[in-house]
Amino acid sequence: SNLQKINAMISVTQFLNDKMDGILRMERDNEDLVHLFHVNGSWSAVEKSAYYLSQMTDCNVITLLAQGQDNSTNGQIVLASVSDELLGEAGKEYSVVWQGDDYLVLRPKNIPTKYSEWHLANLVDDDED
């Protein structure tokens, strides 16, 4: 339902606000890993991790406005989330580097290289005002 979606978004956003600065710093230098955080029954990744994830499996990609996040591009953060099930089905696409209860690090078998184009395509355009 929509309400569930909204609640999921709120908790993801809350989580991101708490940890985002460190995560964005980590993502800036991220060459080949997918850092996933378990929030609300699915795995979420941002920025480069989100890009790598989106190339490995079907996932929901959304763009968050990031107020006061110095490390974000154009004040926006691209976030991808995927269910346990889909992530499991994509198992041949990656190796597991680290596995915790709510934090997972994967290394894709093939590292995609079009992050900038992908990120730009997912930013929300302000020109429509």
Image: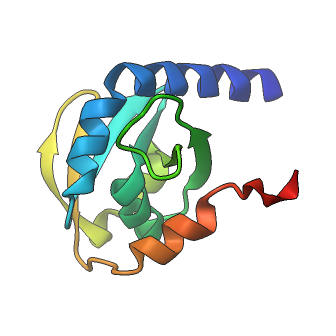
Answer with left or right where residue 38 lies relative to residue 95. right
Say how the picture is coloured.
rainbow
Q: Which residue extends farthest left?
A: 97
Residue at the image position 24 percent from the left and 43 percent from the top: 25
Q: Nearer the viewer, residue 36 or 85?
A: 36
Quadrant of image for the N terminus: top right
Give x and y (percent) for residue 11: 54, 19
Q: Which residue extends farthest right?
A: 129
Q: Nearer the viewer, residue 68 or 48?
A: 68
Residue at the image position 49 percent from the left and 18 percent from the top: 14
Answer with left or right where residue 111 lies relative to residue 120. left
Q: Is residue 25 visible?
A: yes
- Residue 50: name its quadrant: bottom left
Give x and y (percent) for residue 107: 20, 63
Give x and y (percent) for residue 101: 24, 27
The total of numbered circles placed on residues is 0
Determine whether 116 is above or below 6 in the image.
Answer: below
Q: Nearer the viewer, residue 27 or 129?
A: 129
Residue at the image position 68 percent from the left and 54 percent from the top: 124
Q: Is residue 1 visible?
A: no
- Residue 37: name its quadrant: top left
Give x and y (percent) for residue 113: 34, 81
Residue at the image position 31 percent from the left and 32 percent from the top: 21
Answer with left or right where residue 70 lies relative to residue 95. right
Answer with left or right where residue 16 lies relative to residue 94. right
